[in-house]
Image (cartoon, rainbow, N blue to C red):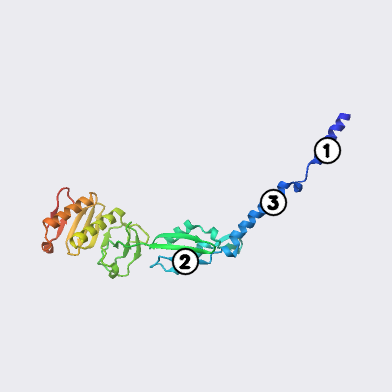
Amino acid sequence: MPYRKRHIKSKIHKIRLQKSIFKMPIFWILNLVVVIVLSVLYFLIFFSGFQVENIIISGNEKIPSKNIEKLAYANINKKIIGIGKWNLMSKSIFLVNSQKLQQEILSRFPVAEAVAVEKKLPQTISLKITEKKPVAIFCSSAGSEQASAKCFFIDKNGVIFEELQSLAQRQDMPIITQTLNSNDIFTGESVVDRNVISAISKIEKNLKDNFQIDIKEALVSNPLRLDIKTNENWQIYFDLNSDTNLQIIKLNSLLKNEISQTSRASLQYIDLRFKDRAYYK
């Protein structure tokens, strides 16, 4: 019996020795850490000195700055908490997702080729826009001479990015036509394979540099054939499935050695589609 009493007293003594959690230093240390972290977060997110107030836009010529600025502010102004109709918003520079903002600008404005986003503490975002340079005009297969044909500027990757109101805007660039599965085409779409665009650019440079001949029109009649119409109103037929460089070498040989500048006035076509041979009329 005495042993049982001693055992019970020992348990009671141990229970009495346990400290309250509020008297433990670790409790107050953890609470202090939480308070500091929350204070820093609140300071970074809501302090007025870190709210984006300035957006500097440069490099854009065709895209209106006000349109870029409006899109940027819509992306920067973020909802932190929403309860019913009440929203707690922040424009903190630390919450700006540069990659997302970049992608939204590129998606909204097909004319934009690249966007560099830079945060300039404490309140400024810099947007440097690089706009696409057209390499040619793309017109629907209905034909560039038809009034109903839609024509667009096209870039080096075969993407159309700006609709032309008139072919007077062509600036002596070649017109590319190609049959599409749908007549409905929109800016931002890839309509011509980039390898075809590269071949046309290479042919254009060669003709202009070596013979002062311009390309008037390029017809991609099927994936294997490219028909070039020159400003002298004769045509060149290329096989897109063969080496373009070798076909250009054959073309140069003909124009230098067999077809004189004066005889080009009556020339109808040069056919380069056959290996090791070339025909002209």
Q: Mark 1 points at which residue?
A: 13
Residue holding disc 2: 56
- What's the amino acid at mark 1? His
Residue 135 relative to residue 56: left or right: left
Number of residues whose C-alpha sits closer than 10 Å to that of mark 2, classed few (under 14), some (14–19) or many (20 or more): few
Task: Work out whether residue 145 or residue 244 is closer to the camera in this orientation and state it.
Answer: 244
> Helix, strand or loop at disc 3?
helix
Residue 182: percent from the left, percent from the top?
33, 58
Q: Which image quarter holds the N terminus? A: top right
Q: How far apart are marks 1 and 3 (CA)?
A: 30 Å
Helix, strand or loop at disc 1? helix
Type of amino acid at the residue the image marks with label 3: Asn
Nearer-the-camera pick, 64 or 23: 23
Crowdedness of circle 1 by 10 Å Cα count: few (<14), some, many (20+)?
few
Q: What element carries label 2?
A: strand
**Quadrant location, the C terminus:** bottom left
Q: Which residue is drawn at 84% across and 32% down?
A: 7
Amino acid type indicated by mark 2: Ile
* C-alpha separation, residue under disc 2 versus residue under disc 3: 42 Å
Label 1 – label 2 distance at C-alpha: 71 Å
Res 217 seen here: yes
Residue at the (66%, 52%) spot, across then down: 34
The residue that appears at 80% across and 40% down in the rendered structure is 17
Q: Earlier in the sequence, mark 2 or mark 3?
A: 3
Image mark for residue 31? 3
